[in-house]
Image (cartoon, rainbow, N blue to C red):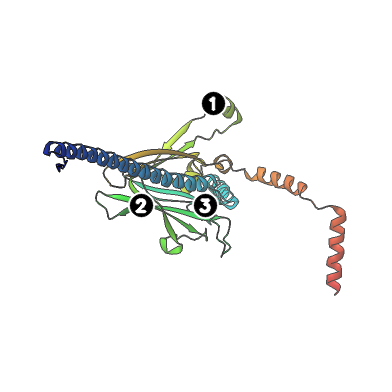
């Protein structure tokens, strides 16, 4: 005769298994939660760095290509000559292009508007844009809490136009979630004589605003040497902020800030005319072609 005996788990064994399972579940959940937070933080950092990189790349290209047309130098030299000749009845020449490099700031350097001429016009496959364009940067407040700002970029193709409001060209955002955006301009003092250029060390002056119309008349400076930007951005949760500092060099500042005197300009132009003089044989062929076209 055989006996039927059933084997099972005791209550103590079941409770021990459930305890171990609960501990493993909590450990796995904690590990997953920490990994998710790390991935989210890394993704936000990458997005923030990418936004700053795109901002730096665009502003660097625009400022590096800042340009002062030759006509501005001519008008500046003419106004200087008229100012020296006090008996002259000639009226001061009004600039053909105003605000060649102009910035308006508030609250100790907080940017409001920055505009300048640049040869860095954005490409468009559907339209042909002029190479020289006016770049306009504006800082506008966003309806967020805490307060934040957005930086927009705009191109105006008619550089002589005195109204470059937002309606004159499409503006788009290049940086958002800005807590503060301070800008300053570093300019080098112009040495008047060759001896000063050789012996005197370079001296730089920093200011929080710039107007080419005023600085050109006072000390002959059309462009600053460097532009320094201190931008502080909120994180995605708008709970903390990170500050970044950028410095941009304006390549054309030495050439733009050292216009030639009228007699130097005429001598320089004579040298250019000699360099671009047409070959006599080609000139003779062109003359013969003009005569032939004239007879027909």
Residue drawn at (40%, 38%) of the image: 245
Q: Which residue occupies the foreground of this view, 169 or 5? A: 5
Q: Which residue occupies the foreground of this view, 96 or 206? A: 206
Q: CA distance from mark 2 to mark 1?
A: 42 Å
Residue at the far front: name it: 1
Residue carrying label 3: 117
Lower sequence index among marks 3 and 1: 3
Q: How many marks?
A: 3
**Of discs 3 and 2, which sits in the foreground?**
2
Residue 150, disc: 2
**Does any portion of residue 211 appear in the rendered image?**
no
**Of discs 2 and 1, which sits in the foreground?**
2
Lower sequence index among marks 3 and 2: 3
Crowding at dot 2, Cα within 10 Å, few <14 / some 14-19 / many 20+, comes out as some
Residue carrying label 1: 200
Residue at the far left: name it: 11
């Amino acid at each position: 005769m055989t006996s039927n005996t059933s084997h099972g788990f005791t209550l103590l064994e079941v409770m021990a298994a459930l305890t171990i399972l609960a501990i493993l579940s909590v450990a796995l959940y904690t590990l997953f939660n920490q990994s998710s937070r790390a991935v989210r933080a890394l993704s936000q950092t990458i997005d923030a760095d990418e936004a700053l990189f795109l901002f730096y790349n665009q502003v660097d290209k625009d400022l590096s290509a800042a340009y002062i047309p030759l006509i501005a130098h001519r008008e500046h030299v003419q106004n200087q000559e008229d100012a020296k000749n006090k008996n002259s009845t000639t009226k001061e020449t009004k600039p053909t292009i105003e605000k060649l490099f102009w910035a308006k700031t508030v609250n100790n350097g907080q940017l409001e508007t920055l505009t300048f001429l640049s040869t860095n016009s954005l490409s468009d496959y559907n339209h042909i844009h002029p190479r020289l364009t006016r770049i306009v940067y504006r800082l506008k407040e966003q309806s967020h809490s805490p307060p934040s700002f957005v930086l927009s970029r705009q191109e105006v193709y008619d550089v002589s136009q005195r109204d470059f409001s937002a309606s004159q060209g499409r503006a788009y955002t290049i940086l958002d979630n800005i807590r503060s955006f301070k800008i300053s301009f570093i300019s080098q003092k112009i040495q008047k004589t060759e001896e000063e250029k050789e012996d005197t060390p370079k001296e730089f002056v920093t200011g929080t605003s710039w107007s080419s119309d005023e600085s050109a008349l006072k000390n002959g400076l059309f462009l600053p040497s460097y532009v320094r930007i201190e931008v502080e951005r909120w994180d995605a949760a708008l709970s903390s902020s990170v500050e970044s500092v950028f410095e941009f060099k304006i390549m054309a500042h030495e050439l733009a800030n050292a216009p030639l005197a009228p007699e130097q300009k005429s001598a320089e132009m004579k040298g250019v005319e000699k360099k671009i003089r047409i070959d006599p044989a080609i000139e003779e062929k062109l003359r013969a072609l003009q005569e032939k076209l004239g007879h027909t």
